[in-house]
Image (cartoon, rainbow, N blue to C red):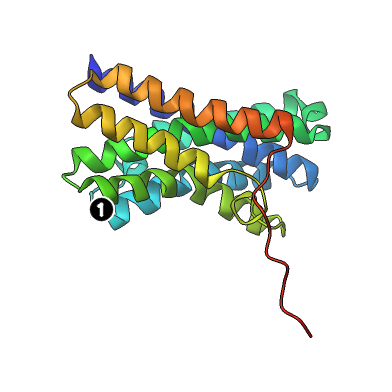
Amino acid sequence: MGGEFLHWLQLVGVGVFALTGALAAARRKLDIFGFALLGSVTGIGGGTLRDVLLDIGPVFWVADPAYILVCVAVSTIAFFGVPYLARSEKILLWADALGMALFCVLGAERALEAGAFAGVALVMGVMSATFGGIVRDMICAQLPLMLRQEIYATCAAAGAGLYILLARLGISEQAALLAGFATAFVIRAAALRFGWTLPAHRGLGD
């Protein structure tokens, strides 16, 4: 049951991140191939880097092509069915927040399962939650969310960290995943709602 739960949870996470890629493609007025490419890169990018660095083989979407199919399906639906969503920056931000919250705990869980130390699992959680979005924004010639003043990576670290702590304390896997996901999402939601940002550097003098 636990493995099946994680599988469906990861499919949802991949689909949500693929949607953010498709929305970004719509705002750039790309064709359907561009939608599928950007949706797929965003959906599987973070998990791919995680599995490669952890030396887990084969990479999750190679072992189970359903993840790629979800990316393509979501991107295609976005291309034909919901073009009006692309006009809303808020929808993209909220979908990205949901994907980030899901992948920060799933990435940490995958790392712990592979035998990684808690600190490594934390890094893998943050990486899984952010890398796909970084690639998406770079392809779209935008400064990645993670590199703006947005409170973003901090949310992923908080969610992954809480999941790891609860898992080490022997809390049930599903409860630990839910708590970590909720923590990351609530912090990110509060940042979006109230405009919280991190202080920026004043820059170097001339």
Rendering coords of residue 178 (x, y %): 39, 20
Q: What element carries label 1?
A: loop
Residue 138 lies in quadrant = bottom right
What residue is disc 1 on? 54
Count the labels in the image.
1
Q: In this view, does 187 lie above or below 175?
A: below
Is 183 placed left or right of 96 in the picture? left
Check the image and name the residue furthest to the top.
Answer: 1
Is 35 placed left or right of 101 in the picture? right
Rendering coords of residue 126 (x, y %): 43, 46
Relative depth, front residue between 61 and 110:
110
* Residue type at numbered disc 1: Leu
Residue 88 lies in quadrant = top right
Q: Which residue is drawn at 82% across and 27% down?
A: 84
Is 17 placed left or right of 64 in the picture? right
Rendering coords of residue 117 (x, y %): 20, 48
Q: How crowded is mark 1: few (under 14 residues within 10 Å), some or many (20 or more)?
A: some
Q: Residue at x 35, y 40 (%)?
A: 107
Q: Is residue 163 above or below residue 197?
A: above
Relative depth, front residue between 133 and 157:
157
* Quadrant including the C terminus: bottom right
Rendering coords of residue 99 (x, y %): 53, 33
Q: Residue at x 43, y 50 (%)?
A: 127
Relative depth, front residue between 17 and 63:
17
Q: Residue at x 51, y 44 (%)?
A: 154
* Quadrant including the N terminus: top left
Can residue 106 be seen here? The reply is no
Can residue 184 be seen here? The reply is yes
